[in-house]
Amino acid sequence: MYLTIITSGERNWSALVPELTCLGTAPTRDDLIRLTREAIALALEDQPSAVPRLRNVNDLDADLRSDLDGSEEIVFLTPAEMNPVSLEIEHALKTAGVTQAELARRLGTSRSAVNRLVNPFYWGHSLDMLRRVAAALEAELEVKLTTKAS
């Protein structure tokens, strides 16, 4: 879990995850928490074995610690879960050398719809859309269910 400094302002909430240099703002605390967890996941995407080092405020850099006035909330956040289906679509696009705009054209949909499909925090993929994406990329679609180890 990553030490996160949260502050509230007149119009929004702000967060800082010092050891990952993630900054964010949002209109509500709940939105801020969600967006910060997503930012943590994205920051860790290329370093899956990273281990959080900051355990408390005393572990912060002295300059940052001196900027704190006590009104901040210190929380520890876990990275948001990333959807492997979205990551797989992004990988298939790169492998096929197809842009999101070209995929949108092939699917007869908007760029924003394709952008949503590759968003690692989107969980609304339909099997029909996955079939259409596979056909548009001339790729095979495999769906696999496995039992959980008990």
Image: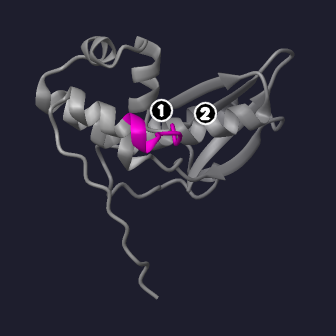
Q: Are marks 1 and 2 in contact (CB under 8 Å)?
A: no
Using the image, determine if residue 145 lies above or below residue 136.
below
* Quadrant of image for the N terminus: bottom right
Residue 121 on image: x %, y %: 50, 38
For image coordinates 32% across by 63% down, the residue present is 144
Task: Name the amino acid, label 2.
Answer: Leu
Q: Nearer the viewer, residue 13 or 137?
A: 137
Q: Secondary structure at mark 1?
A: loop
Mark pair 1, 2: CA separation: 14 Å
- Residue 21 is labelled as 1
Identify the residue position indicated by label 2 in the image: 35
Compared across the picture, whether 3 is left or right of 30 comes to: left
For image coordinates 40% across by 13% down, the residue present is 111
Residue 45 inside the magenta-drawn segment? no
Give whichever of discs 1 and 2 has the lower sequence position.
1
For image coordinates 71% across by 32% down, the residue present is 31
Residue 70 on image: x %, y %: 81, 38
Compared across the picture, whether 69 is left or right of 116 comes to: right
Q: Nearer the viewer, residue 108 or 55?
A: 108
- Residue 82 is labelled as none
For the question of whether residue 43 can be seen, the reply is no
Residue 60 found in image quarter: top right
Task: Name the amino acid, label 1.
Answer: Thr
Residue 64 on image: x %, y %: 60, 33
Q: Main secondary structure of the magenta part?
A: loop
Compared across the picture, whether 68 is left or right of 111 comes to: right
Residues packed near mark 2 inside 10 Å, few (<14), some (14 to 19) or many (20 plus): some
Residue 112 on image: x %, y %: 46, 15
Q: Secondary structure at mark 2?
A: helix
* Region of the chain picked out in magenta, as a range: 122-129
